[in-house]
Amino acid sequence: MRNAKVIIVDDESIVRAGLENWLSQDYEVKSFDSAKSFLDAFEQFEFEDHLPTCILLDLQMPEMNGLELQKTLKLMNAEFPIIFMSGNAQQIDIINAWQGGAADFILKPFTASQITDALDKNFKKISRHKNFASNEIPRKLIDIPITKREAEVLLLLGNGHRQPEVAKLLGIAPRTVKMYRTFLRDKLSLNTLGELIKYCQNYEHSIKRIAEK
């Protein structure tokens, strides 16, 4: 897929070399050892070829980390899908990444298939929605098969509250929150925290409608 570009931003040379080696078989690849070096290249108009582009972005980097780069690109109206990579991300980091518009979040050590699957999914999404604003579909109201209480738990978890905090805010026992988390997993296939946060972000209006009944 030489008509698509992957940008790698990671301060670990081994990671950059490995990613570039296998991804260059299918994509045009550019790699950078820091957020600053990427921004310098970006500001020099090195990305004006209009190729569909995804960024593989390391979360923990010196000087400017991945979350800070994500915010900077948003301020510059540079709307690239960002796939975060991290070996020791904290829950708050994952939440901030999703809320900042991350396309995916992959934990290190990862496999080649995890990376290629994430890229394939996002390039297909770019192709499918290139003539539409990317946030139009998720903002539609949808029917979600959950109860009022499950919706309340989903909103709080999706906005970064831990299960004990959710229990305190709703006046219920922690084990009850855990039970509702299991219900949400089974009903909506939200197996990971990242999936739950992303779902809550995409369908917040529909979830709030249920919670406010």
Image (spheres, rainbow, N blue to C red):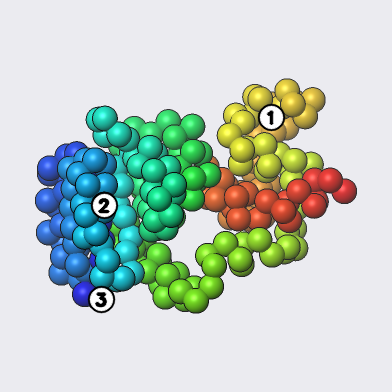
Q: Position of residue 181 (x, y in %)?
A: 65, 41
Q: Nearer the viewer, residue 5 or 155?
A: 5
Residue sitting at x 49%, y 32%: 92
Q: Position of residue 39 (x, y in %)?
A: 26, 47
Q: Is residue 209 above or below residue 67?
A: below
Q: Is residue 72 above or below residue 178?
A: below
Q: Which mark is residue 166?
A: 1
Question: CA separation, marks 3 and 1?
Answer: 46 Å
Q: Nearer the viewer, residue 179 or 172?
A: 172
Q: Give the residue at the far right of this rendering.
A: 213
Q: Quadrant of residue 63?
A: top left
Question: CA separation, marks 2 and 1?
Answer: 43 Å
Q: Position of residue 64 (x, y in %)?
A: 30, 34
Report the residue marked by disc 2. Answer: 43
Question: CA separation, marks 2 and 3?
Answer: 22 Å
What amino acid is labelled 1 in the image? Val
Instruction: Specify whether residue 14 is in view.
Output: yes
What amino acid is labelled 3 in the image? Asn
Q: Would you call the spot at circle 1 few (<14 residues within 10 Å), some (14-19), or many (20 or more)?
A: many
What amino acid is labelled 2 in the image? Glu
